[in-house]
Amino acid sequence: MSNTYNLYNLEPQFKNFLLAENVSNLTLTNYLSDFRHFAAWFEAKIRSTQSADFWEQINFETITQYKKYLFTSSIPLKSINRRLSTLRKFCSFAITQGWLNHNPAKQVQNAKQESMTEKQTHAFEEVLTLYYRHLIKEKGLDSTQAVNQINLIKEFFSL
């Protein structure tokens, strides 16, 4: 395959592959959107700086760089993992076409929520305690209402 090949040329074939797998319309839309996002990043960041064969550039290092880019772009964890899932599916498609002989995206783990350190947890609990007092003294909430507010905050931060 020539070096002038690009990922955008592959979208219709990838779409047909996904349709053959009977994915839902929403899943299809998400896969194609995520694929276009990766393609744009790949063309801008990778293809412009490397001269290696096109398919050799679809590798563990490239996918890891993309994952780091997603993190630094403040993309939600769920979206990062969906985009990584799309790359796994795309690489599976490329294998069926004989363009790749293994799936480098399978080697890249999903992003995980980093848990707070013990010190961070303690500091957060102190802030919540101060906020609880504020809700009762300044806002006039009763203890049940204040606890409910605190629980909403904890739920928001998945604590």
Image (tube, helix red, strand yellow):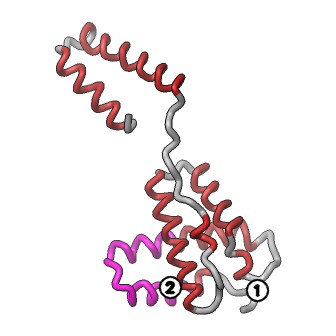
Q: At which x and y percent is residue 35?
A: 52, 73
With respect to residue 120, does 102 lie above or below? below
For mark 2, what is the residue? 14
The local crowd at label 1, few if under 14, some if 14 to 19, many if 20 or more residues have their Cα within 10 Å, is few
The quarter of the picture where the N terminus appears is bottom right
Dot 1 falls on a residue whose secondary structure is loop
Within the image, what quadrant is residue 21 found in?
A: bottom left
The local crowd at label 2, few if under 14, some if 14 to 19, many if 20 or more residues have their Cα within 10 Å, is many
- Residue 108 shown in magenta: no
**Residue plotted at (65% across, 61% down):** 64
Q: How many marks?
A: 2
With respect to residue 114, does 10 lie above or below? below
Nearest the eye: 114 or 77: 114
Q: At which x and y percent is residue 98?
A: 62, 92
Within the image, what quadrant is residue 149 found in?
A: top left
The magenta segment is: 9-34
Q: At which x and y percent is residue 65?
A: 68, 60
First of labels 2, 1 by sequence position: 1
The quarter of the picture where the C terminus appears is top left
**Residue plotted at (17% across, 20% down):** 144
Q: Main secondary structure of the magenta part?
A: helix
Dot 2 falls on a residue whose secondary structure is helix
Q: Amino acid at mark 1?
A: Asn
**Residue plotted at (47% across, 25% down):** 121
Q: Amino acid at mark 2?
A: Phe
For mark 1, what is the residue? 3
- Residue 32 shown in magenta: yes
**Residue plotted at (48% across, 20% down):** 123
